[in-house]
Image (spheres, rainbow, N blue to C red):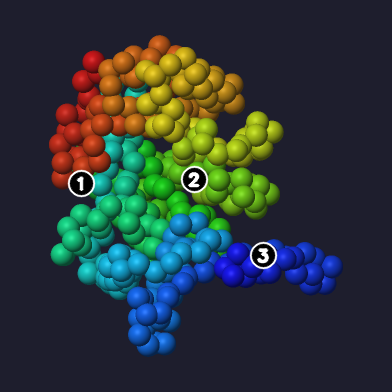
Amino acid sequence: MLQRITEVIAEPLLIQAHEFFVTCSLGVAVYPDDGATAETLTKHADIAMYRAKELGRNNYQFYCPAMNARTLERLRIEADLRHALERSELVLHYQPQIDVASGGIVGMEALLRWEHPVLGLVSPLRFIGLAEEMGLIIPIGAWVIRTACRQNMAWQKAGLGKLRMAVNLSARQFTGKDLLQSVADALEESGLAARYLELELTESMVMSDVDSAITILRRLKELGVHIAIDDFGTGYSSLSYLRRFPIDVLKVDQSFVADISLGADGAAIVVSIISLAHSLRLKVIAEGVETAEQLAFLREHGCDEVQGYFFSRPVGALEFEHLLAQRSCTMA
């Protein structure tokens, strides 16, 4: 029966000469095991439907009691997330970016964390997706940019160096109408020169609508900020499109860096990305560097900058100040 329902819904709809395809997520609760009343059964079927959505949509799930606990936790996190900004529970941690040639800190990536009063430090994996779904990622993203710019300027005024601050943009932020104004306001309010702010986007974000992405990127470049493509190599960029994007940096995804020591194929991909970036006059940053072996390989093949646990995990502002005060990182 469920299969028949999905097949019927999947049939194309013709509207004004355009074909539209619809999928569905189904949740099922069965009497009497899953509830004795219509109200309880409907509630449990609804919970099962949301589980189907979490598993990628266009599938069906039968209710089980474990889903209830998962849903209650999600509802709790949703409710608390709505107040996280106003309660000052969101904080930024910073991970240094190291110049391979000199060994010095030349930049940092700002990474969002949620210090929940009961749950403790909540992983971004648990709440960033929710913030996207709930529409909260726009105000949260604007707060991240403002806070990162203010912090960078504070470190500059303290004489800790003029470094580049990298901030990740979400898909909804990138296509939102307020992005340019949000970035411009953050720079103006903080007094930070635009060249010290770097905005990171994933391949999939810029490739979903190439022409629109190029327009947005050009407007951001007009502000003077740097643009980086994060997780490079995991998406589906073509060289013809890559040449059209006004970007400054390619970031090698950490999965490729991890593969360096596993065999020739992983190492070859990293070498190819470095060569490609340099041929396009772009800088290369390798993420997820955890061993001296990986660092030596990246240095040998001309990678410009690196970041990862080999140097430092993401740390709070005070601890990062201590790193900046040292002004260098030991390169094994």
Q: Which amino acid type is shown beneath numbered disc 3? A: Glu
Q: Which mark is residue 330?
A: none
Give the label, 1 or 3, closer to the camera. 3
Instruction: Point out residue 147 in the picture as x, y percentages from the top left corner.
Output: 31, 55
Measure how far apart labels 1 and 2 are at the Cα level.
23 Å
Q: Is residue 200 above or below residue 28?
A: above
Question: Does residue 177 appear to the left or right of 142 in the view shown?
Answer: right
Q: Quadrant of residue 62?
A: bottom left
Question: Does residue 126 appear to the left or right of 16 in the view shown?
Answer: left
Q: Which amino acid type is shown beneath numbered disc 1? A: Ala
The residue singled out by tag 2 in the image is: 201
Q: Which amino acid type is shown beneath numbered disc 2? A: Leu
Reading the chain from its start, which is encountered first: label 2 or label 3?
3
Q: Is residue 142 above or below residue 314?
A: below
Disc 2, SS: strand
Q: Which mark is residue 7?
A: 3
**64 or 151: nearer the eye?**
64
Residue lying at the far right of the rendered structure: 17
Residue lying at the far front of the rendered structure: 32
Q: Which mark is residue 317?
A: 1
Q: Residue at x 41, y 24 (%)?
A: 259
Classify mark 1: residues with Cα within 10 Å, few (<14), some (14-19) or many (20+). some
Measure how far apart labels 1 and 3 are at the Cα level.
53 Å
Q: Residue at x 34, y 31 (%)?
A: 288
Instruction: Point out residue 281 in the picture as x, y percentages from the top left corner.
Output: 56, 25
Q: Residue at x 79, y 72 (%)?
A: 15
Residue 85 visible from this viewpoint: no
**In the rendered view of the protein, which quadrant contains the C terminus?**
top left
Disc 3, SS: helix
Residue 177 visible from this viewpoint: yes
